[in-house]
Image (cartoon, rainbow, N blue to C red):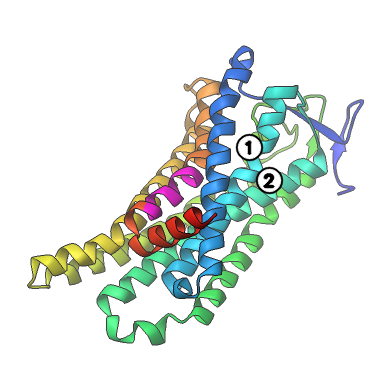
Amino acid sequence: MEAFNLTSSEPSTFILSGILGLEAAHIQISIPFATFYIISLVGNVMVIFVVGKDQALHKPMYLLIGMLALTDIGISTSVVPKALCIFWFNLKIITVIGCFTQMFFLHTVSLMQSAVLLTMAFDRYVAICNPLNYATILTNARIARLGLVGLIRAVLFVLPLPVLLSWKPFCTNRIIPHTYCEHIAVAKISCGDTTVNRLYGLVTAFVIIGLDLILVAVSYALIFRAVLKLSSKKAHQKALSTCTAHICVTVTSFTLFFFSILTQRFGQGIAPHVHIIFANLFYLFPPVFHPIIYGIKTKELREKVGKYACRR
């Protein structure tokens, strides 16, 4: 970290601006932020607790739902607390090490979540297209190994982002026009050449997460083809109902992610506060709605959550 070259009176800090153009409304904006964050914490912690506590849910599908809930907590916690500090207490200063740590953590968890969503699509593919071998193909141990591989992949691809930026000079402009240390927002305030940084970030986002999305789409194309071959309409509905929750989760997560990436890099005509708000939505909305979606669409999980909630 000694490579940081900040020529200012406080060379070890950056300043997060908050939502540009809406500074006067920070308190009002903080209300939905805090509300959604609390809801996401309660919902996802409950899912993790129930999946971990109940032996009947120690199955690949539910373990993956628990992993998704864990990444949701990581995503929202990496962004929202600092944003609330800006909104409530005007605490805009963040250390360079803290900024790069936040950047590494939130992008790592985002890639990890993409891997979990891909594994969930593979889980549904095996369950519907090869049900007789489901128990031997997708064991709990294999799910754990796939989760570890996803984490290692995320760390290896995200680590160069803060490392490459640590080699760049940051001059007198230390103001990051954002509520958190998003990679491209930090790169834009460097007075050095950040072409490599920008290209690497863009390639990582579209190649890694884009490849995951393509594989998810292929999985569901094969699932739909297999479902269409079923003769019973009731079998059609039962097979598709097991995929509905995951499709909803995948669409919300990937749509907000790519919209945020594209507006941040190519939406020069879009107002700054729109950039920032949509970037925050990616880290705010999915963690709120994921446990709700799975609670509504997954009967066994819904019943177990209800049982534990009523007991307490």
**Residue appearing at x 50%, y 70% in the figure:** 54
Q: Is residue 146 above or below residue 274?
A: below
Looking at the image, which is closer to me, 252 or 169? 252
Residue at 39 percent of width and 55 percent of height: 294
Q: Which element is circle 1 on?
A: helix
**Any magenta on residue 231?**
no
From which residue to which does the magenta span run? 286-295
Q: In the rendering, at what x and y percent does residue 217 appear?
A: 32, 60
Amino acid found under the numbered disc labelled 1: Val
Residue farthest along the right direction in this orientation: 9
Per the model, the C-alpha gap separating discs 1 and 2 is: 13 Å
Looking at the image, tell me whether mark 1 or mark 2 is earlier in sequence order.
Answer: 1
Residue bearing the label numbered 2: 103
Please determine whether, in this image, residue 109 is positioned above or below residue 19.
below
Residues at badges 1 and 2 in contact (C-beta under 8 Å)? no
| Mark 2 secondary-structure assignment | helix
Comparing 49 with 189, the one in front is: 49
Q: Tell me the chief SS of the magenta region.
A: helix
The residue that appears at 52% across and 63% down in the rendered structure is 50
**Residue 188 visible in the picture:** no
Quarter where residue 181 is shown: top right
Which residue is labeled 1 in the image? 80
Residue appearing at x 63%, y 37% in the figure:
80
The quadrant of the image that shows the C terminus is bottom right
